Image (tube, helix red, strand yellow):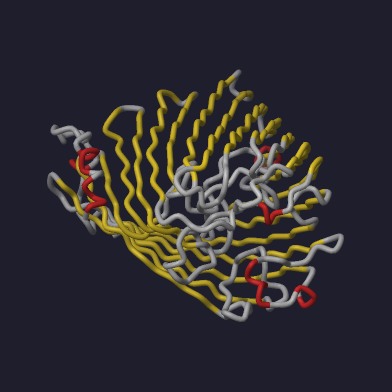
Amino acid sequence: MSRLLWALPLLSLAPVALADSAQAQSHGFIEDGRWSILNRSVFDQRDYKHGGRNSAARNAYKPRNARNGKAEEWAYGLMGTFQSGFTQGLLGVGVDAHAYLGVQLDSGGGRAGKARLLGVDNDGHPKNEYSRGGAAVKLRMANTVLSYGEQRVKTPVFSSSDSRLLPETATGWFLTSNAFDALKLVAGHFNESTDRNASSHDQGFVVNYSNGRQGNSFDLAGAVWNPSAAFSGSLYTSRYADSWNQHYLGGTLSQALDDRRSVSLDLNLYRTTDTGKALSGRIDNTTWSLVSRYNQGPHGFSLGWQQVDGNTPFDYVTRGAIFIANAVQMSDFNAPNEKSWQARYDLNMGAYGVPGLNLTALYVRGFDIDGTHVDPEGGYAYLGYGKAGKHWERDLEARYVVQGGKAKGTTFSLRHNVHRGNTAQAELDGDQIRLAVEWPISGGF
């Protein structure tokens, strides 16, 4: 209950006059409720090159010489969600609930690895199936919602990833207020995050690069300003207990040139410094990216630059809290002092008679990696960064969404990704193929 007290003052942002608020338009707990079921099948194969081995943590139970040079998993996921409406009155009450199931279609102890599609047992073998579920209670006053429980969150500093078989979730408080026009305010306090292939809820936080001791809480607050369709800006601050403080500044600016051409700029900037007991070691890191995009009809062309200023990699809690542009399929291009550039081309095949089909080609090159000044007692020393590290990645994707009929909304995606680098950077050389099929079903009451 004490965690609720800090959020109550924010509820006062809700205006006393409720006539035009979201809560005033409530039809009821069931009447505004929605349910959805998502069927997803994912095949992920990573073929490691030049002596690279499948060294994911789940294979720690296998001796290195017994690990396969190919990580390969195929699985089916079933995700059911229920989002209630709110009871009527000054203070509306509702519930959001979810249940997830993952089923192994093919893999093995030597192949289960970095794809993180499947849960594993204590011997490092992939489980035949795994599941989890949870719920969050939510309160709404006017245009402000406070929820507590297990939920999915989307912010630049703490975000539930849905890039594998099942989504991440987080347990804690989360508040969203749309009390002011064009301005959204958010705040949250979380006690844990649950990884995408996990079935338990008591493993603490998912931290991507540090092997230091874990903090026991995560706090965030932020504001998103969207005064027009052409501009959006956001500012966040966060604290990972006894580990680091992280601040974020982001903005998107777009401009139509005519009815077929447009340009845009996308900025993401993170500032991270150690705090408290500094459980991950010394951190003094500024990481940013800037991407320019030009669209002409069905064609999209992008150029981007990303830079890490600091002697640790850019790190983040949860798998999805990384909005920098060059965090792509096989690498985040976030090594100490790394610079990287991006070139991307997108093609909408609807203009050529195939509506729903989109093609993407992406190339990223990183260089000037220097990890020789990483804190030797910190959580990043084990990564073994050297000096003059460099690498590159090429990603190709075809994505098709069924446009009509009973299968409308079904999505097929095929990716082929290649990563290569020298030994002064921490990523493995490898080729990846990923095929995913999603079939959504949804409805109301």
Q: Front-most of 340 and 39?
A: 340
Disc tally is 0
Res. 324 in view? yes
Considering only vertical position in the picture, is 124 above or below 141?
Answer: below
Residue with the most extreme right position: 50
* Residue drawn at 53 percent across, 38 percent down: 272
- Image location of residue 330, percent across then percent down: 70, 52
**Image quadrant for the C terminus?**
bottom left
* Residue drawn at 67 percent across, 66 percent down: 56
- Image location of residue 262, percent across then percent down: 61, 24
* Residue drawn at 77 percent across, 78 percent down: 66
Q: Would residue 440 be found to the left or right of residue 309 on screen?
A: left
Res. 353 in view? no
Q: Would residue 197 be found to the left or right of residue 109 on screen?
A: left
- Image location of residue 176, percent across then percent down: 32, 42
**Image quadrant for the N terminus?**
bottom left
- Image location of residue 247, percent across then percent down: 48, 36
Q: Would residue 94 be found to the left or right of residue 185 on screen?
A: left
Residue with the most extreme top position: 257
Q: Front-most of 353 and 303?
A: 303
Considering only vertical position in the picture, is 290 above or below 160?
Answer: above
Q: Would residue 59 be found to the left or right of residue 20 on screen?
A: right
Considering only vertical position in the picture, is 212 above or below 54?
Answer: above
